[in-house]
Amino acid sequence: MNKILLSRHLLSVLLLSILILFAFGSKDSGSSPSPSPSPSGGLVPLVGNIYPGTEVFDRNGKHVGKIIEANPNGRDPYTGEKCRMITVQYADGTVEPKKWDAALNFGWFVKK
Amino acid sequence: MDVSCQPAVGKNPKDTLFLSGFHLMFVGGLIYVLWRNEGLWMFRWFRFLGLHPLVSGIRSLGLDVWAPVREIVIFSLPDGLWTASSVLLFGWVWHGVSHPIRFFWILLPGVLSIGGECLQAVGLCPGTFDPNDLWACIISFGAALGLVVFSPSPRNE
């Protein structure tokens, strides 16, 4: 392999590394405020495991409420923006729509 | 090579490939900065690099996308831009080289993005399959590949 080809291969590897870094940067970090250990028996952080009927808990294991709707083709009721939406029914009975992606950062936990 | 029927892609085709690829990547990145949620890895990196005030300032501009195409622009277009810019940048690297190995690198972004979407569709790759993402990748890959292949090139190896 001549030097020019070798240099292009090396440049290509470098470029591919940068492109993969860019692609990785666009992935969800799953950064809940508390990715720490599961708070109490059998709870895991809410990451992508959102389904209607999912019960959610805080980091202390206290019941927060239940996801009663998960809509991947929803719309933000405040901005009209199309986005994945969930509807949460809190333990006190109040119902509130939330952005699906935002909910991943609430520090909620679900049962395994 | 007869370049008389080649499309006019600029005075220096190699520069055009680089600038096109760079700008498409920039636009794709800007879409993420403006409209995607801050749970993405890149926002962690921005904080680490001390760029978060700048990013927050840009996001606070409150720019919006025309509603009928908002979902496609925000969620699918970046995939297409990544694919196209990658093809163009590899085309830039391998511009002027006639060795067949260049096709491996130039086709690689298309294989990764389109293949990844197809694997998502059958559940073999993590992520959510979206037909719009797939179309964005296919169209942008085809367009960028056309630009690279038909770009006037002094074949010197």
Image: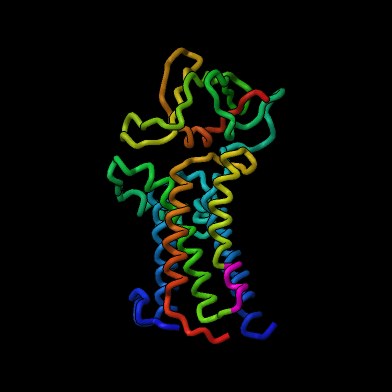
Residue at image point 54% right, 55% down: A23
Which residue is situated farthest in the left direction here?
Answer: B66
- Viewer-side residue, A2 vs B21: A2
Residue A82 in the image: x percent, y percent? 37, 36
Q: How many marks?
A: 0
Residue at image point 41% right, 25% down: A97
Quadrant assignment for the N terminus of chain A: bottom right
Q: Main secondary structure of the magenta part?
A: helix
Position of B9 with respect to A62 (left or right) is: left
Residue at image point 60% right, 36% down: A34
- Viewer-side residue, B118 vs A106: B118
Quadrant assignment for the C terminus of chain A: top right
Residue at image point 43% right, 51% down: B136
Q: Is residue A76 above or below residue B80?
A: above
Q: Is residue B60 above or below residue B155?
A: above
Span colored in magenta: B99-105
Residue A105 in the image: x percent, y percent? 52, 36
Whether residue A52 appears in magenta in the rendering, the answer is no
Q: Is residue A90 above or below residue B43?
A: above
Q: Would you identify the image quadrant in which residue A107 lies?
A: top right
Question: Colour mode?
Answer: rainbow
Residue A20 in the image: x percent, y percent? 58, 59
Which residue is situated farthest in the top direction here?
Answer: A93
Residue B64 in the image: x percent, y percent? 30, 46
